[in-house]
Image: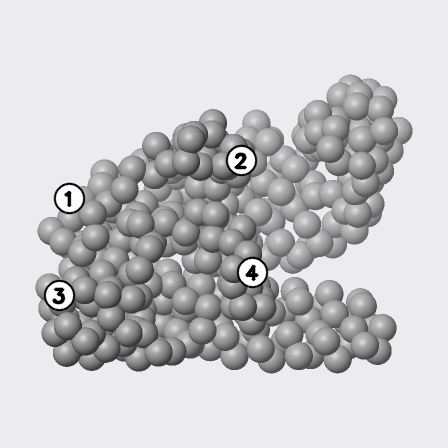
Amino acid sequence: MILTYKIKHGRDFSDELRKAKKIAEYAIQTHNRSSKDVKHIGLKSIIANQILKKYSSNKRIKKVSSAKLAIPHQGIKIDQNTKTIYAPCLKLYLKYDFPNNFEKVNQIELGEEYAYVSVSIPEPEMDKPSGWIGVDRNTTGHIAVVSDPESGKVLKLGKAALHTHTKYKNTRKSLQKKGKYGKVKEIRNRENRIVRDINHKVSRKIVNVAKELGKGIKLEDLTGIRKSKNQAESFRYAKNSWSFYQLQQMIEYKAKLLGVEVAYVEPAYTSKTCSRCGKIGDRNGKSFKCPACGHVDHADSNAGFNIAKRPCIDRSVKERDLAEGTTDSPKIALARTPLTIEPQVL
């Protein structure tokens, strides 16, 4: 399993980054991978080789705005006693706070402010769950509602995300009307950082709860939900601006680190089905009422209970069908989701 950690390096690499961009531009134009041809630019060959390898082989890249300094594992030394990473080619020392359970440091990428340290860690053994908690992800209200059918307890998380999106959406509209597009980009980046932090905290809480209870986590399989056209404009905006998949990936990798199993269920009618009697009920906003048995609940809590109770699906079969095409699914190549997500700054 590969994880990437983000560490503030505290060095001025502006000259080296400028040279890295030149080498990347050369690689895009020539697709040449020989470091001898860029020796005159003045960047260390061990870094130049990595940049050439990255950009020369990718013919889809036509332009580069910036390029990071990449150092392979051969050019990295580790002192696990002092928790220090040393890159001799740049005389760079990095103190790290992440666990020493990694097998090796694969690579370091350096930007203007941060070092991105990629490490390989052994695959943890998965715990056999004693039960399941269901997680209902939303675009309005709380971004995640966790329901435990065994205890009947409900945990609502991440209410600030919708407020953040609404606030910055209105700010961007105002700036766009004034033609301040640089400021629009700055605001969007700020929003992304805030939401990423919310998703980190929410995913950590969900996984920790599951670990403490000795249970697995069930999520709705939302593959293809972004392609649906029969949705209100407000829902489409919220769905695409707040990342379902970012939270999902964070839950997946955090759960894997702790040996917590994550499974998926079919999403149809999770919020409209009564979690007590199984009949279709009436949902009005965040309220749910079942005319059959009289059960009344918060719609998201009800959905969470349904998700926890539903049988798991084999996503590998579904993904293969989507990629290859079947009689009942469109012939669309499925974009595979990377397993590695960058953990929070440590």
Residue 313 location, quadrant: top left
Residue type at numbered disc 2: Ile
Q: Residues within 10 Å of mark 4 (few under 14, many from 20)?
A: few
Disc sitting over residue 128 in the figure: 1
| Label number found at residue 80 | none
Name the residue: 47% across, 27% down. 324
Pointer 3 residue: 277
Disc 2, disc 3: CB below 8 Å?
no
Q: Nearer the viewer, residue 120 or 45?
A: 120
Sequence-earlier tag: 2 or 1: 1
Where is residue 248 shown, x and y percent of the image?
41, 53
- The mark lying in front, picked from 1 and 4, is 4
Residue type pointed to by label 1: Lys
Q: Picture quarter containing residue 286? A: bottom left
Amino acid on which disc 4 is placed: Asn
Upstream in the sequence, badge 3 or badge 1?
Answer: 1
Q: In percent of the image, x 81 and y 77: which residue is there? A: 177
Q: CA distance from mark 2 to mark 3?
A: 37 Å
